[in-house]
Image (spheres, rainbow, N blue to C red):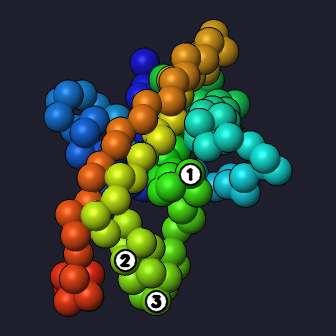
């Protein structure tokens, strides 16, 4: 059975490569806009499932892995910064703080339609970052 990773993340790809199994990667192309008042945990699971389901018809006999991740700092969801200034501000705010990364993971068996999904939190404590450290990063 074909295994497909619905991600372009080099980190997710490297994790799966550690299993020494054959798989292919496909870039997810879905709307990742959060829903109004949607908890981060629910959002990452919803998006992981949507990424996997988006190609299920095209691959009728595959195990499709979808994943999504979002970070939370002081109860606020962080978005992808998109530019240096926003990235600098986010890292400055995270300096010395705890950031929780919520990772949604989905395994879809396209031949049966069976979906298994989970949200896994991982908390990181940032050390105090100087402006120079942030710029170098």
Percent coordinates x, y for residue 121 in the rendering: 42, 35
Q: Left or right of 123: which side holds 44?
A: right
Percent coordinates x, y for residue 117 in the rendering: 55, 22
Q: CA distance from mark 2 to mark 1?
A: 16 Å
Report if the CB atoms under discs 2 and 1 are less than 8 Å apart: no
In this figure, which residue is indicated by the disc labeled 2? 92
In this figure, which residue is indicated by the disc labeled 3? 85
Residue 123 appears in which quarter of the rendering? top left
Residue sitting nearer the eye, 78 or 51: 78
Quadrant (top left/top right/bottom left/bottom right) for the N terminus: top left
- 50 is higher (above) or lower (below) than 125: above
- Secondary element under disc 2, as helix, strand or loop, is helix
The residue that appears at 35% across and 52% down in the rendered structure is 98
Q: Considering only order in the chain, which callout, 1 or 2, is on the residue closer to the N terminus?
A: 1
- Secondary element under disc 1, as helix, strand or loop, is loop
In this figure, which residue is indicated by the disc labeled 1? 75
Residue sitting nearer the eye, 65 or 69: 69
The residue that appears at 62% across and 12% down in the rendered structure is 114
Give the numbered dot on residue 60: none
- Secondary element under disc 3, as helix, strand or loop, is helix
Q: CA distance from mark 3 to mark 1?
A: 22 Å
Q: Considering only order in the chain, which callout, 3 or 2, is on the residue closer to the N terminus?
A: 3
- 91 is higher (above) or lower (below) than 132: above
């Amino acid at each position: 059975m074909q295994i497909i990773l619905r991600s372009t993340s080099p980190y997710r790809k490297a994790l799966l490569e550690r299993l020494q199994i054959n798989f292919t990667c496909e870039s997810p192309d879905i709307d990742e806009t959060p829903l109004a008042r949607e908890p981060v945990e629910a959002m990452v699971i919803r998006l992981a499932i949507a990424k996997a389901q988006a190609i299920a018809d095209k691959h009728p006999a595959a195990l499709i892995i979808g994943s999504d991740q979002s970070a939370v700092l002081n109860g606020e969801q962080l978005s992808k910064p998109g530019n240096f200034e926003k990235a600098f501000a986010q890292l400055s705010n995270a300096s010395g703080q705890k950031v929780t990364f919520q990772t949604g993971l989905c395994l879809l068996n396209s031949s049966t339609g069976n979906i298994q999904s989970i949200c896994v939190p991982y908390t990181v404590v940032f050390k105090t970052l100087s402006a120079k450290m942030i710029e170098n990063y």
